[in-house]
Amino acid sequence: MRAAFYDTPGPAKSVLRVLDVERPEPGPGQVRVRVALSAINPGDMFMRLNSTPQDFQRVGEHTGRIPHQDGTGTIDEVGAGVDPSRIGERVWIWMAGAGHPWGTAAEWTVVPSEQAVAMPDGISDELGACLGIPAMTAHWCLHADGSPRARTVLVAAGAGAVGHYAIELGRIAGARIVTTVSGPEKAALARAAGADLVVNYRDADAAQQILDKAGPVDRIIEVSLTGNLELDLAVTGPGATIVTYAAQPEDPTLPVFRLMWSNLVLRFALLLTEPREALLRAAAEITTALREDALTPLPVHSFTLDDVALAHEAVENGLIGKAVVDLR
């Protein structure tokens, strides 16, 4: 089969190439998926740039890894212990490359059966490919500290992938959603996702706009703790929680007394180390939302497998929406 591959860290055009590798066979508890769309996340950039020799594993005759965690496809083979009736099922995939080299940037991948989730009828590959890490991260950030129902939740970067699904899943959970964006195009995307209030964080009075129109917020889902901490502290109420799911090159300086004064909770979220039961709950509730037509796709930008390096560069350059490799 054809697969994107790298065996050393570095820039996309320098290290990513397409190889013919042996098609994987599913082991016990696994399914094999004929991949339709392979979705790219910022975490894939981090892995490519920061992998060490210990991160590379045997892939046929090669040692390295096939990138990407998310995607969609159809199950064509199952391993021992998996119901054979799953063969032919269209699925959305999460964390495909966790713990083994078989990411989704290939014609086939193998994953634990529970990480290939049946897609309801009528759901497009484009929507299914947008889920995975973004939607499941959003779900964990919303629910890690209890139900967000009747809470005011501030979602930073509401036009981003995690932000988009934090808005939609937050509304489903009964939260009031405030979001910040950087311009009109992103504001339109956040409103379309269902945000109750959209504020340009570059406005000098951004914090006051939030307080005047929404009051103090109870929970913040944060993409840039370093850049946004002052705004966050200005709009949080006593006992609020700030959940950050991304790391910046420079760590923030924490104003400890100000955090203590308001009894704030600062939580760090990483999907790879999230409790398994929370991951399975997220997958189930996301699928229920799909069944109820309550989730929408991001703007999808398709690339061929041969152009996988260009796709990575587009993500690195701030592409709005979701870059996918189309293997159909």
Image (cartoon, grey):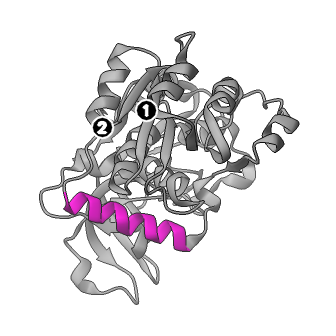
Sequence-earlier tag: 2 or 1: 1
* Dot 2 alpha-carbon crowd within 10 angstroms: few under 14, some 14 to 19, many 20 or more: many
Estimate the x, y position of residue 6 in percent, counting from the top left. 56, 42
Q: CA distance from mark 2 to mark 1?
A: 9 Å
Does residue 213 appear in the picture of this structure? yes
Q: Position of residue 216 (x, y in %)?
A: 57, 37
In the image, residue 282 lies at what x, y percent?
44, 64
What label does residue 248 carry, if any? none
Q: Which of these two is toward me, 234 or 319?
A: 234
Determine which of the numbered discs, if any, sits on residue 158 in the image: 1
> In the current view of this chain or complex, which residue is farthest to the left?
122
* The residue stretch that appears in magenta: 277-292
Q: Nearer the viewer, residue 53 or 199?
A: 199
Q: Disc 2 residue type?
A: Ala
Compared with 259, 205 (above or below) is: above
Residue 40 visible in the displayed image? no
Residue at the bottom extreme?
A: 81
Q: Residue at x 73, y 49 (%)?
A: 53
- Magenta span dominant secondary structure: helix
Reply yes or no: does residue 187 show up in magenta: no
Task: Residue type at mark 1: give it.
Answer: Gly
Q: Which residue is mark 2?
A: 193
Residue 208 image offset from top left, x and y in percent: 55, 20
> Is residue 282 on the magenta stretch?
yes
> Which residue occupies 42% across, 53% down?
132
Position of the N terminus, as image quadrant, is bottom left
| Residue at left offset 41%, top offset 29% | 311
In the displayed structure image, the side of residue 184 where residue 237 appears, left or right:
right
Crowd tier of the residue under label 1, counting other residues whose Cα lies within 10 Å: few below 14, some 14–19, many 20 or above? many
